[in-house]
Image (cartoon, rainbow, N blue to C red):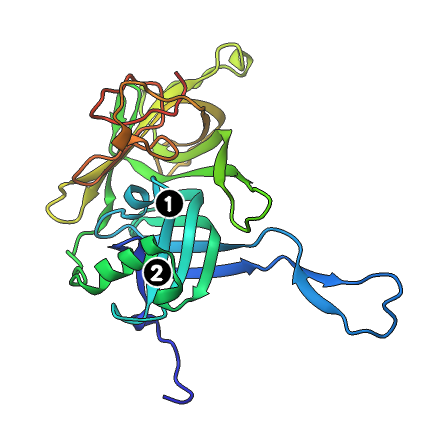
Amino acid sequence: MPFGRIKADNQLFFLNTAKVFGVQSYSIDNTLGAYTIKYLGMGSEILNESFNSAQYADLSLTALMIYDDLIIPQATAPPFNVFILNNKNDTAPYSLVSGYISSYSAQFSPNQIPQINTSFRFYNNAGNIATGNLDPNSIAQLSTISNSPIPAFNNQLANSNYINLSINESTGNRVLDFNFGISVDRVPIYNIGSRVPKRVDIVFPINVTCDIKFEADNSFINSPLSDFPQNKNVQNLEVDVYSNLSNSPMGKYQFVNMTMISNNQQINVDGNLTVTRKYRGYIYNYTDASATASAFLDFGFVASGPGFYYDWGSVALTATSGIDWGNS
């Protein structure tokens, strides 16, 4: 219809063939590599534009943690595709082809549905591309979407008021705020004669940070300043997330060998002692030779169903548990 608008309720967001629930917003920034061609003696000739550097598209996504976290299970085996459709039979959806995660973070706050922020970079193509002009893998994925019913929301939300924090052997249910983030540097490797990279390598180590605010009890001990760095505070962190459906477990995050790099504690006459701590760790280029080929995941996440389970560290993994990129 003339002068129509693209409405938010018509935006179906798919990562490969999985519908991503809870998307709040996204933005796409296309880098065209534009270059103005100039040369000596051109006089009054018209300037021409071409590309003179790599082309790629950056996608930033904000989503609520509802249904399940579908981003990591799909995105941990790159490259992957994103399709934004007006309906499942859209013949020219907005397609982002051959992508990798650049960053991933999650925010947990009181009385709020946890929020996930993710950024991706796509190297092959991006735009409203007619289905017939896509590569065979993308065509097959869109065919699967078209021929399958769109999944319905299962009413599951991550319950921000039921999150359990474990720090080594000390466990408490008084987490006030928690967030974590990872950032992944990558280097695309190009061959002469190809506009898309032959492969995209991770630059290790991968930086991981966690910020936690909680009400403390007497099991939390603050080390003297002089202990750092010789006797630094290294912790194993686990955060268990529960569903709003009968408070059943939804999944958990584990962070192994994280070093505390800042610590703040506060108290006043009207409240309890609160502690805010920042931890930092690194994921190194290490793989567990006992893991199966199907378990090779990006970042070192270990996914298990139902829900999610992300392993960041040095625990010994079995052939059924996945790949460890961590501090071994």
Give whichever of discs 1 and 2 has the lower sequence position: 2
x, y percent for residue 205: 49, 27
Depth check, mark 1 against mark 2: the one in front is 2
Q: Name the residue under label 1.
A: 107
- Local packing at callout 1 (Cα closer than 10 Å; few below 14, some 14-19, many 20+) is some
Check the image and report above or below for 215 versus 127. Answer: above
Q: Nearer the viewer, residue 318 or 61?
A: 318
Where is residue 14, by image quadrant?
bottom left
Check the image and report above or below for 313 versus 93. Answer: above
Q: Residue at x 12, y 49 (%)?
A: 245
Residue extending furthest left? 246
x, y percent for residue 221: 39, 18
Check if mark 1's residue and mark 2's residue have beta carbons within 8 Å: no
Residue extending furthest bottom? 2
Q: Distance between the residues labelled 1 and 2?
A: 25 Å
Q: Nearer the viewer, residue 296 or 189?
A: 189
Q: Residue at x 32, y 43 (%)?
A: 72
Q: Which residue is drawn at 44% across and 37% down?
A: 182
Check the image and report above or below for 234 versus 199. Answer: above
Q: Name the residue under label 2.
A: 83
